[in-house]
């Protein structure tokens, strides 16, 4: 009985690992690297919204996905927020200001600008798969 449970657990583990490998194998770099904005440098204070009030606690806030697709100067459609572009940062900053005003009080408030996927990234299955692969490549 115990042996059967071990075999089942090993089989499930191998199945999950196989699925994960197949997912990663399906990822390719069809989206050129030029359409993916530069990664934020979180040692740069400009990549953070922060209010240090000398509070006894900190709030760390991740903004919602609100960035839309936009066209680069070469005509390529971009599906990721460029945290160095003020026009794209403006809506993010608006949300950060609003949440800080609502929740901040006497607490310190920190929120990173991050290279989020755009809302349109999830419109089609193939675009969502490509976007997910690009996102996974950052992690792996």
Image (cartoon, helix red, strand yellow):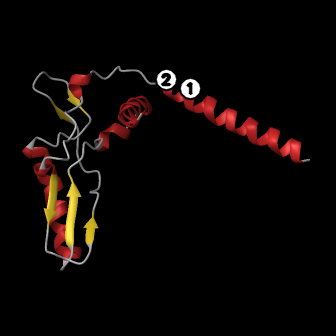
In the image, taking residue 9 as reference, residue 3 lies left or right, namely right
Q: Percent position (x, y) of residue 30?
A: 35, 19
Q: Is residue 89 above or below residue 124?
A: below
Label 1 vs label 2: CA separation?
Answer: 6 Å
Q: Quadrant of the C terminus?
A: top left
Q: Which residue is drawn at 49% across and 23% down?
A: 26
Q: What element carries label 1?
A: helix
Q: Mark 1 sits on what residue?
A: 22
Q: Nearer the viewer, residue 107 or 61?
A: 107
Q: Mark 2 sits on what residue?
A: 26
In the image, taking residue 9 as reference, residue 122 lies left or right, namely left
Q: In this view, does 88 lie above or below 39?
A: below
Q: Is residue 121 above or below residue 108?
A: above
Dot 1 alpha-carbon crowd within 10 angstroms: few under 14, some 14 to 19, many 20 or more: few
In the image, taking residue 93 as reference, residue 62 lies left or right, namely right
Q: Percent position (x, y) of residue 33?
A: 25, 23
Q: Which residue is drawn at 52% across and 29% down?
A: 23
Q: Percent position (x, y) of residue 106?
A: 18, 80
Most extreme residue toward the right is 1
Q: What element carries label 2?
A: loop
Mark linked to residue 111: none
Dot 2 alpha-carbon crowd within 10 angstroms: few under 14, some 14 to 19, many 20 or more: few
Q: Residue at x 74, y 37 (%)?
A: 10
Q: Which of 121 and 19 is in front in this view?
A: 19
Count of all numbered marks drawn on residues in the image: 2
Q: Percent position (x, y) of residue 139?
A: 39, 37
Q: Residue 76 sits in which quadrant?
A: top left
Q: Do the residues labelled 1 and 2 touch (CB within 8 Å)?
A: yes
């Amino acid at each position: 009985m115990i042996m059967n449970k071990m075999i089942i657990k090993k089989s499930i583990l191998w199945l999950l690992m196989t699925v994960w490998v197949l997912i990663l194998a399906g990822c390719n770099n069809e989206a050129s690297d030029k359409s993916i904005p530069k990664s934020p440098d979180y040692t740069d204070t400009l990549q953070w919204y922060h209010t240090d009030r000398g509070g006894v606690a900190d709030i760390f806030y991740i903004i919602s996905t609100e960035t839309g697709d936009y066209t680069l100067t070469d005509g390529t459609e971009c599906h990721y927020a460029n945290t160095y572009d003020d026009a794209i940062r403006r809506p993010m900053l608006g949300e950060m200001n609003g949440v800080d005003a609502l929740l901040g009080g006497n607490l310190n408030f920190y929120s990173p600008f991050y290279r989020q996927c755009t809302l349109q990234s999830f419109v089609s299955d193939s675009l969502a798969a490509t976007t997910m692969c690009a996102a996974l490549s950052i992690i792996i």
